[in-house]
Image (cartoon, rainbow, N blue to C red):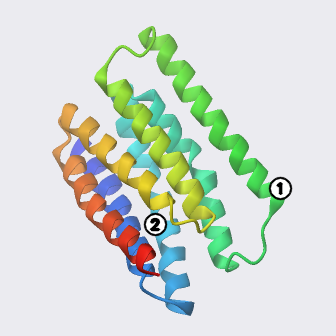
Amino acid sequence: MDLILQIWGGAFYLINKILFALSEGKHGKTEKQLKVSGWSIYILGVPAWVIILVGHQNWIAAAIEAGGIPAMLLGLYNTYHDHKRPHKAFNIFVILCTYSSLAFGLIYSLSIHGGITSVSQVLEVGVMSGFLMGSYFMAKNNPDGWLFFMLMNLSMASLMFLQEKPILMGQQLLSLCFVLYGFNKTRKR
């Protein structure tokens, strides 16, 4: 089952990063289709990531993955409407979900482990910061999201290495390549 979850979560996440990176070089309908597909495919991979992370008591990272779904939906909504129909209530809801999941995961992890007591928790904080800020900036069509995704990829790759999940570690490093590509494309624009 662990292998299936690694392949499922890793493949969907990697496809998301590939689609986002490829969309940076496109315009119009093609760009929109790639981004809508990217937001959608990531959401479908979240359950596998949450199961894996909870199984290793990575409460911070698990809470962030689950709590990041509203940011993904905001990105999907904004992309579908070409960032021309901001939805203020939805935006506030996403911010509340983001901060609530951040607080829940952090507080729960701190209470279970008695503070930040391990390298894995430090890496989870890197994942948390990179994922939440990266997803939020990307949902707002802000290219700074790529920088936060770099932090997230490196932190998650390190965490997966420590927890002997070679497929997910490799997928994170491969995703980092596409994040770098996407970041470089945005800098050239």
Label 2: few (<14), some (14–19) or many (≥20) C-alpha neighbours in 10 Å? many
Q: Does residue 70 lie above or below 57 as drawn? A: below
Question: How many neighbours does mark 1 have within 10 angstroms: few (below 14), some (14-19), or many (20 or more)?
Answer: few
Q: Secondary structure at mark 2?
A: helix
Q: Which mark is in front, 2 or 1?
A: 1
- Extreme-right residue of the structure: 89
| Viewport quadrant of the N terminus | top left
Q: Which mark is residue 41?
A: 2
Name the residue at 65% across, 77% down. Answer: 80
In depth, the one of 144 and 108 nearer the eye is 144
Q: Which residue is mark 1?
A: 89
Picture residue at 38% right of the left edge, 25% below the top: 57
Q: Which mark is first along the chain, 1 or 2?
A: 2
Say which amino acid is labelled 1.
Ala
**Looking at numbered disc 2 in the image, what kind of residue is underneath it?**
Ile
In the rendering, at what x and y percent does residue 112 appear?
A: 46, 12
Image point (41%, 37%), residue name:
126
In x, y percent, where is residue 20? 43, 72
